[in-house]
């Protein structure tokens, strides 16, 4: 049996105010199994201005087999870290932080953290996101009237995606924004309420991350008026819309770059890193000449792009467009080059502008690896990041087929793509390793920021999870995406069971008209059911997370609030788990929410869970009793 241990997280069960001001005192609570220790003292240890500060906790009372301690913590820094100290009567000392319980001192970076920057809008935590790559989603009747651009290789909607350059970036299916409008009811039926569009600005590629302007919507997508129509129609259905900006670079056709390229002394010269006197050599994203890198030391670039009500950032948040926020492409590299690091300045300026224009908007970063250093609440509300959920999920639940595929250069490979990592294949993880990775890569991120991280099975930059999913594991993966802390994400086509070996090959045109085919219908029903689970139980958005059992085959956790508890079981194989009495209070009142698993309460109060794997199951339980 899994032993009972103390617990604390950043949710309202344990923290009195998730959006404190500097100087404000917040009450924090620690939940300790009755009889644990016994303890002679419980304290918090903060580190304001890098000088330790202690507060004593008092025993609040007991309920359902748990003792509750509470202590005051005064918020002295914008990111104020704290941890718990447990003093046992026998002299044993334990520290408790975001990685768990320890017998030696712990790292400040892994402390719990209160954030005294303005909080994101509450709707972020209630969101289920749907990502659309506009060229591949739907063509309206107007799309046939758009001329084929000079860079494009035209493709019919049912043509296969070309994996080899130049087709990868130039194959053109012609989806447009009015095509999205025509299918918004599909999103409503799924239950999603946040739409994320990859770039809509004019460019010389199908992905449009090489913008030639940020001041207008690509006419191939229907122009500015089409975006106005889309946002208005989405809002009428209760769906918010965010866009995608490249803060690290523009395209080489961009009007700013063209004004400076080969023109020394041009006002836009300082927008980029030119390397010679003729302004013909320059820094670019990973050496790609079509993506010249921005130099954020330029005050004029900041003014035009980010700062104030007339900037690019502000324009699209204001009427008539009224978008609801931004996802920032390559946010991790933005403002960084060698010994230059302006990233914090840029993300903070972005957020200030958005708060001034419309504080009810969100700001998400692309930071695909360890994002913790940038995710401390001073700028990004959350991130599209992969090591804290997506990559370990693949490692646990995928079973590579070894099927050959072509790279961008036309080379044949059988080694499965794994997020661009040349590691000789795809790692094979146990359920415990999956859980360990989730803990490791979220331990240095404040709870409030973690709730804004995108929980994607895949995106437009990755292969599709279904490509290598082991038999029966798709429900497990989707179930975890909607029940673990963070924003669930569907990449358009996931709900049809589409596959793709890597980022470009996953950008498959939507198979409209196949909804009633058995496989597609079953996958659509799965997504609708699990999204409904997320939407109908607010605790899955903002409640605490407590792991109650983890082994190599499966895991069990609860999401908790005073109002409700959701108990979750996920496994790749057959699973049988016995939880000690008191681990899951109220289990006798459990109601099945999803899945085919057995929950039984023994005479001694222990809880027995079993299922044939792969399995994903969830139960509703009463809320947590707090004295």
Image (cartoon, helix red, strand yellow):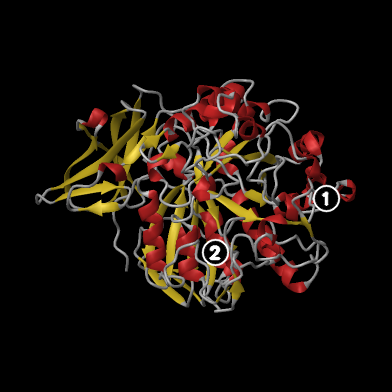
Label located before the other in sequence (2 or 1):
1
**Rendering quarter of residue 190:** bottom right
Give the SS element for disc 2. Answer: helix
Q: Tell which residue pokes out farthest to the front in this image.
A: 278
List the residue tagged with mark 2: 477
Could you say which is closer to the camera, residue 290 or residue 142?
290
Percent x, y of residue 90: 9, 51
Q: Position of residue 560 (x, y in %)?
A: 46, 49
Side (left or right) of 315 relative to 298:
right
Which residue is located at x 78 percent, y 44 percent? 221
Asked whether the beta carbons under mark 2 and mark 1 sit within 8 Å of each other, the answer is: no
94 on left or right of 576: left
The vertical placement of 542 against 578, above or below, is above
Label 1: element kind = loop
Where residue 142 sits: x, y (%)?
89, 46
Instruction: Report which residue position mark 1 lands on.
Output: 148
Does residue 320 lie above or below 607 as drawn? above
Q: Quadrant of the N terminus?
A: bottom left
Q: On residue 618, which mark appears? A: none
Position of residue 345 relative to residue 124, above or below, is above
The residue at 39%/35% (across/down) is 340
| Residue count near mark 1 (Cα–Cα under 10 Å), binned few <14, some 14–19, many ≥20 | some
Q: Position of residue 509 (x, y in %)?
A: 75, 60
Q: Nearer the viewer, residue 5 or 35?
A: 5
Outermost residue on the left side: it is: 91
């Amino acid at each position: 049996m899994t032993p009972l241990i103390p617990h604390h997280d950043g949710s309202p069960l344990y923290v009195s105010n998730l959006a404190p001001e500097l100087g404000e005192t917040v009450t924090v609570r620690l939940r300790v199994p009755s009889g644990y220790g016994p303890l002679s003292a419980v304290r918090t240890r903060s580190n304001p201005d890098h000088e330790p500060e202690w507060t004593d906790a008092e025993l609040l009372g007991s309920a359902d087999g748990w003792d509750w301690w509470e202590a005051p913590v005064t918020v002295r820094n914008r990111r104020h870290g704290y941890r718990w100290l447990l003093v046992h009567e026998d002299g044993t000392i334990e520290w408790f932080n975001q990685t768990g319980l320890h017998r030696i001192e712990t790292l400040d970076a892994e402390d719990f953290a209160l954030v005294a920057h303005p909080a994101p809008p509450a709707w972020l935590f209630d969101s289920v996101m749907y990502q659309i790559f506009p060229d591949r989603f739907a063509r309206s009747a107007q799309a046939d009237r758009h001329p084929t651009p000079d860079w494009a290789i035209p493709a019919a909607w049912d043509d296969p995606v070309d994996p080899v350059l130049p087709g990868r970036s130039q194959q053109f299916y012609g989806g447009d924004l009015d095509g999205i409008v025509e299918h918004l009811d599909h999103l409503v039926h799924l239950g999603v309420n946040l739409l994320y569009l990859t770039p809509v600005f004019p460019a010389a590629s199908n992905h449009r991350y090489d913008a030639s302007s940020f001041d207008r919507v690509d006419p191939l997508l229907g122009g500015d008026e089409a975006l106005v129509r889309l946002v208005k129609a989405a809002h009428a259905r209760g769906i918010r819309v965010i866009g995608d900006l490249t803060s690290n670079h523009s395209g080489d056709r961009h009007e700013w770059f063209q004004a400076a390229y080969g023109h020394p002394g041009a006002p836009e010269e300082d927008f980029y890193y030119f390397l010679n006197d003729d302004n013909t050599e320059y820094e670019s994203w990973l050496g790609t000449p079509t993506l010249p890198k921005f130099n954020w030391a330029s005050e004029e670039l900041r003014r035009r792009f980010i700062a104030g009500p007339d900037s690019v950032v502000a324009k699209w948040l204001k009427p008539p467009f009224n978008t609801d926020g931004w996802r920032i492409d390559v946010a991790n590299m933005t403002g960084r080059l060698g010994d230059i690091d302006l990233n914090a300045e840029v993300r903070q300026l972005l957020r200030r502008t958005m708060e001034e224009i419309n504080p009810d908007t969100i700001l998400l970063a692309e930071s695909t690896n360890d994002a913790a250093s940038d995710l401390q609440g001073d700028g990004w509300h959350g991130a599209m990041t992969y090591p804290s959920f997506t990559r370990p999920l693949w490692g646990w639940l995928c079973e590579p087929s070894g099927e050959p595929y072509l790279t961008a250069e036309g080379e044949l490979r059988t080694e499965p793509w794994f997020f661009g990592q040349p590691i000789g294949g795809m790692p094979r993880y146990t359920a415990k390793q999956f859980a360990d990775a989730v803990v490791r890569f979220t331990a240095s991120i404040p709870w409030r920021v973690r709730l804004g991280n995108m929980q994607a099975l895949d995106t437009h930059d990755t292969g599709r999870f279904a490509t290598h999913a082991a038999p029966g594991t798709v429900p497990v993966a989707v179930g975890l995406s909607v029940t673990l802390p963070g924003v669930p994400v569907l990449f358009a086509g996931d709900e049809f069971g589409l596959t793709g070996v890597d980022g470009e090959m996953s950008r498959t045109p939507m198979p409209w008209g196949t909804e009633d085919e058995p496989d597609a219908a079953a996958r659509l029903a799965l997504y609708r059911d699990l999204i409904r689970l997320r939407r109908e139980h607010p605790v899955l958005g903002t409640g605490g997370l407590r792991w109650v059992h983890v082994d190599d085959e499966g895991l069990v956790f609860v999401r908790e609030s005073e109002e409700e508890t959701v108990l979750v079981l996920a496994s790749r194989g057959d699973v049988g788990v016995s939880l000690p009495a008191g681990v899951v209070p109220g289990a006798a009142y459990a109601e099945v929410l999803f899945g085919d698993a057995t929950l039984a309460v023994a005479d001694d109060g222990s809880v027995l869970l079993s299922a044939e794997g792969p399995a994903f199951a969830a139960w509703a339980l009463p809320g947590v009793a707090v004295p």
